[in-house]
Amino acid sequence: MKKILITGGSGFIGTNLIEYFLRKDSIYNLMNVDKKPPQNSEHLGLWNKCNILDYMKLSEVIKQFNPEYIIHLAARTDLDGRTLDDYQDNIKGVENIITIIKSLESIKRVIFTSSMLVCKNGYYPQNNEDFKPDTLYGESKVIGENLVRSNLPKEYPWIIVRPTSIWGPWFDKPYLAYFLLIKNKRYFNIKGHNILKVYGYVENTVTQIDAILNGGVNNETYYLADYSRYNLKEWSDEISKCFKGKNIIAFPLMIFKILALIGDFLKFLGVIFPMSSFRLKNLLTENDVPIENTKHIIELLPVSRTEGTIKTINWIEKYNK
């Protein structure tokens, strides 16, 4: 039986990862360390309330459990912070984990979760330390990665994973909002733009994490994503049809540019609006990531995009989102 401690197990990916491990029954002994209670009440028995910024309590909890494996998911993931100090979960939190695990003899492997946003949208990194963030969140993740590489020796069994745009049951904004806009017929495509982007269905993501935990190469960095990029127009039409709707209406780009300017002005006034220049730029920018080394670890993923869409919509309907 493998003893696995998951930080941030009450979050989106963490909830799905715990469900994945629980399906394997007695293979794993799990603990979820999170400052928030589990989203899924069935996971309450695995939860240990602890803030990763509270070094003394975190150290006590981890040493008492004495894990063989740690999957460090806990982080602040939004883009709303105003300074790097707002992202101490991603910096000091990583530093705390590093300090604690150095004193543990039981550790066989630690996975640190970073983000594809260590590089700005549309930038394809040439190597694992080719960074180009354009958000404070991305900068905080760069710092976290550098802390791992500079403070853990080469012989230490650490791995970094970079989730891409992950979606599926138990998600929240922005991708839950994307599904709900389509459900409520308030989402529109851009005419003449068939944009390709990297996404990952969460069940595939946690399968990749498990494969990397058991077969990954130490001191390596792995992206977490589905292996084929999504055509956004095709996917939005697919989601709409799964909601028993029709193909999404498409409007000219100029309409979106006008809406983006309106959104910029409303944001300045403190009013939330679904479109802005930042969001429009991200929407129009195609992206890709180096996924080949992940494919070497796990060649086939269990869930297709269509299957994932159906499962996600069933979850939305079940929980009245």
Image (cartoon, grey):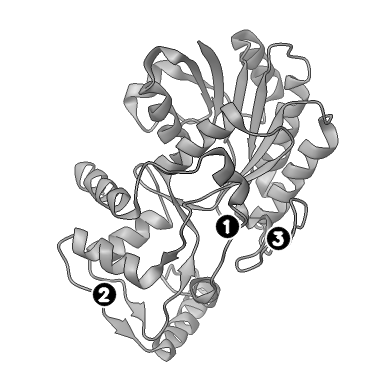
Number of numbered tags placed on the structure image? 3
Label 3 crowd (10 A; few <14 / some 14-19 / many >=20): some
Q: Which residue is mark 3?
A: 125
Q: Is residue 26 above or below residue 51?
A: above
* Lower position in the chain sequence, tag 1 or tag 2: 1
Q: CA distance from mark 1 to mark 2?
A: 30 Å
Q: Which residue is mark 1?
A: 80
**Which is in the foreground here, disc 3 or disc 2?**
3
Element on which disc 1 rests: loop
Amino acid under label 3? Pro
Amino acid under label 1? Asp
Question: Residue 248 bears which disc, if any?
Answer: 2
* Lower position in the chain sequence, tag 3 or tag 2: 3
Q: Residue at x 34, y 50 (%)?
A: 304
Task: State whether residue 130 appears in this view.
Answer: yes
Does 309 sit left or right of 107 as displayed?
left
Element on which disc 3 rests: loop
Element on which disc 2 rests: loop
Label 1 crowd (10 A; few <14 / some 14-19 / many >=20): few
Say which of 291 and 75 sits in front: 291
Q: Position of residue 1 (x, y in %)?
A: 50, 10
Where on the picture, by quarter, is residue 246? bottom left
Does 239 sit left or right of 300 as displayed?
left
Q: Position of residue 114 (x, y in %)?
A: 64, 45
Q: Position of residue 25 (x, y in %)?
A: 37, 16
Q: CA distance from mark 1 to mark 3?
A: 25 Å
Q: Position of residue 196 (x, y in %)?
A: 47, 69
Where on the picture, by quarter, is residue 234? bottom left
